[in-house]
Image: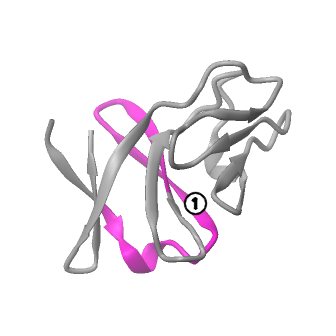
Amino acid sequence: MPWIDACSTDDIPAEDVIRFDHGGRTFIIVRNHADEYFCADGLCTHEEIHLCEGLVMEGTIECPKHSSIFNLATGEVETPPACENLRTYGTRVENGRVMVNL
């Protein structure tokens, strides 16, 4: 799978999220408090709400509509009503750019 240049590391404040669209799909790129970056599908698996408006906290993201919480590293659902995990993608930082493996 190709590595895609998604954004600058400066585009995302710590403990925040941005939307990234590529190939007709929506993803989220998240930066945690330790400056680690994560990429996952950008729509909640419960009702396809955009997660880019969600709350990032302690390695998780909370859906803004029904409060499902997903683990950013694994995509696993930690709090219902969602019951299907998010798909996650590899990330790496190169020269101040966040690269994602889609």
The residue that mark 1 highlights is 17
Element under label 1? Answer: strand
Mark 1 residue type: Val
Could you tell me how many numbered marks the image carries? 1
Q: Is residue 99 above or below residue 49?
A: below
Q: Nearer the viewer, residue 79 or 25?
A: 79
Residue 100 image position (x, y, % from top left): 29, 51
Q: Is residue 14 above or below residue 58?
A: below
The quadrant holding residue 24 is: top left
Q: Residue at x 64, y 70 (%)?
A: 15
Q: Residue at x 40, y 31 (%)?
A: 25
Residue 94 image position (x, y, % from top left): 20, 72
Residue 32 image position (x, y, % from top left): 57, 68
Q: Nearer the viewer, residue 55 or 49?
A: 55
Q: Residue at x 46, y 31 (%)?
A: 87
Q: Which residues are magenta?
A: 6-29
